[in-house]
Amino acid sequence: MYDKDQPIASVSRQDWSNDRRGARDEARHNEKVKESIKNNLDTIVSDGSIITADPNTKKTVKVPMRSIELPRFRYGQGKGGGVGTGEGGQPQPGDSVGDGKGQGAGDQPGQEYYEAEFTIEEIQQMVFDDLELPYIKPRESHQIESEEASFDDIRKKRSTNNLDLGRTAMQNMIRNAQEYGKAELRNISPDDYRVRSWQEKPKPENNAVVIAMADISGSMGEFEKYITRAFCWWTVGFLRSKYPEVEIVFVAHDTEAHEVSEEQFFSRGTGGGTKCSSANRMALDIVKNRYPPSRFNVYPLHFSDGDNWSNDNEECVNLVQGLLDEDVNQYAYVQIGHIGRSQLLGEYETNISDKRFKGLRIDDKSDVLDALKKVFSSGETEK
Amino acid sequence: MNHELNSHVHHNEAYHTPEELEEAELEKALSEIWDIAEEFGLDPFPTNFEIIPPNIMTELGSYGIPNRFSHWTFGREYRKMKTMYDWGLSKIYELVINSNPSQAFLLENNPPIENKFVMAHVLGHTDFFKNNHMFTPTRKDMPEAAARHADTLRAFEDRYGQLEVEEMLDDVLSIEEHIDPYLAVRPQRQEELLMWRQEADRQRSSEVVYEDEFDDILGHRRGKSKKISRAESRIAVPPSPDRDLLGFIRNHAPYLDDWQREVIDIVRSESIYFYPQRRTKIMNEGWAAYWHKRIMREMGDRDLISDEDNEAWWLVHSSVVAPNPRSLNPYYLGMMIYEYLEDFYNGNLSESEQAWLKKEGVTLPPKYEGPLKDSPALAELREVMSNNDDQSFIRNYFDKNVAERMNMYLYEQVTYLDGSTDNVVVSTGWKDIRDSLVSSMDNNGSPLITVINGDYNRAKELYLRHEYDGQTLDPEYIEKTLPHLYNMWQRPVYLETVDSDGEELDDDLPIVYMYDGEKFHIEAAGS
C-alpha cells in the first residue's frame, strides 16, 4: 500500500531558472552551422539575392544550409517503404497509402535542411577574411597620417551652432533630478548645453586605386554580365570594408572606353564590337595622369568574355605590359564564359611573363569565390 | 515526530499557492495510482516526479539524462525539439530516467488530468526498468554518474581546451553505438592482453611453452632473450572479431592520451546504459500504454476522476496510440500485442482468431470472466515482459491475429514515369510483416562493424569489417566516418564492406575502404 509517511513516490518542483545547458549547446551548434557556411561560400558568393543587395543594407538573406550532423556508419538508402497500420479497415495490395516519407523498416532519417539567416555584412566578412590587396607597398608618401576631422567629441558650451540636442536635454534632466529630485525637461540653461566639436584624428592612408574595366560589348551574354556584376560587387564591397580609402575608377568599353560612375558601371546596357585595348589605353592614361604608381598602389582589373578583335590582341599585350612597366602593383584579367580559352587570355599568357599579371577564367558561378581569392591574394603566395 | 511537526505547519498555513495546490492534488492522485498499479501486480522502482517547465522538458528530452555532458549534437536536438514544440507539432509529455529511485518529469502547464495520466504511464516504465531482463545489468546510478562525467569533461575543457575536447567527443560519438552491450566493464589493456595470451596458450598448450608472454604486443622486453619464433609467439589482436569498437580503441589505439581514453570510457558507459532502451522501444512503450489505459480506467471506475477528466485522458490516450499509415507507432504495436496476449491467456479471443490458432495447432486456455487483476493473463504478461526484447517479442508473439487487429501491411515506394512517387501496399501477409520487422531490428537497426585486426600490415593499422547482412552501407557516410576513426587511431584505418552498386546479391563484391589521414583508397578485398 502507498505509505504517505515513507513515500516511494513523490511530486516536487525545483528551480531551473539558472539552467542554460540546452541554450549553450544550441548556440554552439549554430556557431558550427555558421562555420560550415564557409564551405558553401562558393555557391553563396554568386547568389543573386546577395549580389543585387545594397552592400550597406542591414537586411538579411536566408541561406539554405544542411544542418550539421555527426556522421556514423549507416545503411544506404534502400527502396523506400516499411510497415504501416491502417486507420480504418485493411488496405489491400495495390492500394496507395499516401505519398510522403515513411519511417519504416530500413528507412534512414532524411537529411535535415534549414535556412540560416545571415546579414549581408556577416557573409561579406566571411568572404573578405581571406582577401587582401596583393603586392601592396609603401609609396612615396608612405602611410601619410592625414589629419581627418570627425564629429565625435561632445563638449560643454562653445557655440550653439553644433548643439547636440539629445545630450543637452539629457544633461538638463540630470541637473533637474539632482536639484529638484525630478528628472524632467525644463529650464534649459547654458550650463546644460552640450555641443559637438571637431576633433582631429590621425588616419592612415594607403593611397591605392583599383581600375575596374568591364567589357560591355554585344558578345557579353547574360551569364558574362552576371559574373562581372558578382565579381565587381564583391570587389567593391571588399575594398570599401577593408581599405575604405581606396579609390575605384570604373571603365566600361566596347570598341571605345568610357569612364563611368559606379551606378552606370553596374547598370550599363551592352552593344557593339570589342576592342579591349580601348580600356587598357584608358587605364594607362589614368595611371599616367592621375594615379602615378610612384605615389599610388594601382590595380587594374579587366573583365571580358575574351571575344576580342583578333588584330587588337597584340595591342592589348603591349598596353598591359606598358601598365606593368609603369609599375602598377598587379594587372588582373578575368575571362568569363563557357567557350574555351579564347585568344586574348592565351596571348597574355604567352607574351607576359611578369608575375604581377594574373589571368584567370570563370566558367561557372561557383568559380567566382576562387577567382576573387586569386585576384586578391597576397603576392607572396602566388606562383 | 516529524510527521506531527509537518501537520502542525500545515494547519497554520492559511494560504496555499496554486503550485502547492496542484502538487497536493497530484500527490493524492499518485498514491491512488500507485495502489491500483500494485493491485495489478506492477512492481515499479520508487519513482519521484518533478514538475518542470516546457523548455526544461525539451532540454532533458534532448540530452536523455539530467546534467549530462555538453555537446553541440545535444544542442542540435534541443533546437529541433524546441521548434517542434513552438510550432505545436509535438510535445514531450513525459520523461523518465532508468535509475533507482527513478526520476520522472511532468510538464507544469499540462492540465492535472494529463499529468495523472502521465504518472500512470510512467509507473509502467519504472516497472519495466525494474523487471525486464535487459535492464538488469544497467547501472542504476546513471544520473549521478552522468553528472560526474559532465564534471570530468568540463575539467578536461579547462585543461586541454574546449575545442580539443569537443573534437575528441565528435570522434567518439560518431561510433557510440558500436559497443558490446554484454561487456559493460572491459578489462584494461594489460589485463586483456594477458587474458588473450593465456587463451591462445591454452589452445596450443600441447605445443610450446613461452617465456615471454607479451613478446610482440608489448614490444621487446629487456633481459628476455629466449628464442621463440615470432609466428608462434604472436597472438592476434583481437583474437576474434570484436564488436566493441569503443572498447577496443580505448585499449589499443597507439597514441591516445589518458584523458582521451577517459572520454571514450564516458561515452561508452552511457551508450551501454542506453542500449536496452533502444532494444525495447516497442515492449517498453507498449507496456506503459497498456498499463496507463487500465490504471486510468480503474481510476474512473472508482470515481477518483471526474467524467470530464475521463474523456480528457481518453483523448490523449487515443493520440498516443494512433495508427500511422507509413510508420509503426511503438506505443500502438506494443500495446496491441499485450492486449492480444491478455485476450489469449484469458480465453477471450474472437471465434475467428481462435479458429486460426486451432488450425495452427495451438492449445487455447479456458475462458476467464473475472476481473483482470485476478486473471491468469497477468502472470503470463509479466513473464513475456521480463524475458524478451523487441526482436524476440515480435518473433514470438506477433501473428496473423495481431496483424489483422492492426490492419497491418508492408508497403513500398514506387516512382511513376512522370517522376511522381507514391507508397503502395505490397503485402498483407503476416509472415512478411513479421520477418520485415524482425530483420529491421538486427543490431538495433545499425550496421554491425567489428575489429578484425589492430595490427594490420604489422604496422598498427586498424582493419574493420562490416558484417554484411544483405544491406549495404552508405558510401558517403563511410567516407565521413572513417576520418573520425583515424583521428583516434592515428594510423591508417580500413573498412571491409560490400560494394553498394550491385542490385543483385550476386553482384555484391567485398571492397575495402582505406583512409590514411589524407585520402581514401578503395580496392577490392583481398587485393
Image (spheres, coloured by chain):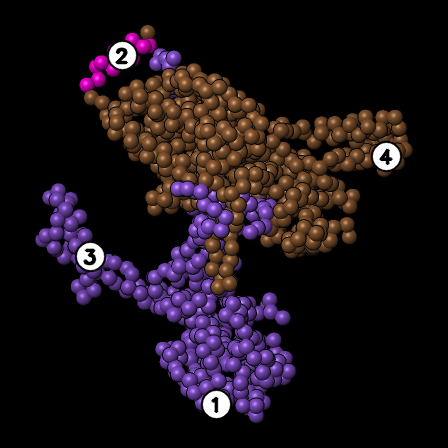
Chain colours: A purple, B brown
Position in image of residue B297 (x %, y %): 34, 24
Q: CA distance from mark 3 to mark 1?
A: 59 Å
State which quarter of the image contains the N terminus of chain A.
top left
Identify the secondary structure beneath mark 4: helix
Chain designation of label 3 = A
Label 2 to label 4, Cα distance in Å?
A: 78 Å
Q: Chain of mark 4?
A: B
**Which dot, 3 or 2, sits closer to the camera?**
2
Residue A273, labelled with which disc? 1
| Residue numbers of the magenta segment | B2-14
In front here: A201 or B285?
B285
Looking at the rendered image, the disc whose residue lies closer to the viewer, 3 or 1, is 1
3 or 4: mark nearer the eye: 4
Asked if the stretch drawn in magenta spans residue B407, the answer is no
Name the chain letter of the residue that bears numbered label 2.
Answer: B
Circle 3 sits in a helix, a strand or a loop, which is it?
A: helix
Question: Do marks 3 and 1 share a chain?
Answer: yes
The circle drawn on residue A166 is: 3
Mark 1: secondary structure: loop
Asked if B145 appears above or below B176 in the picture, the reply is: above
Label 3 – label 4 distance at C-alpha? 91 Å
Give the CA separation, mark 3 to mark 2: 62 Å
Name the chain letter of the residue that bears numbered label 1.
Answer: A
The secondary structure type at the circle numbered 2 is helix
Q: Which mark is residue B232?
A: 4
Residue at the image position 79 percent from the left and 34 percent from the top: B235
- Left of A36 or right of it: where is A237? left
Please, what is the three-letter code of the amino acid marked with disc 4?
Glu
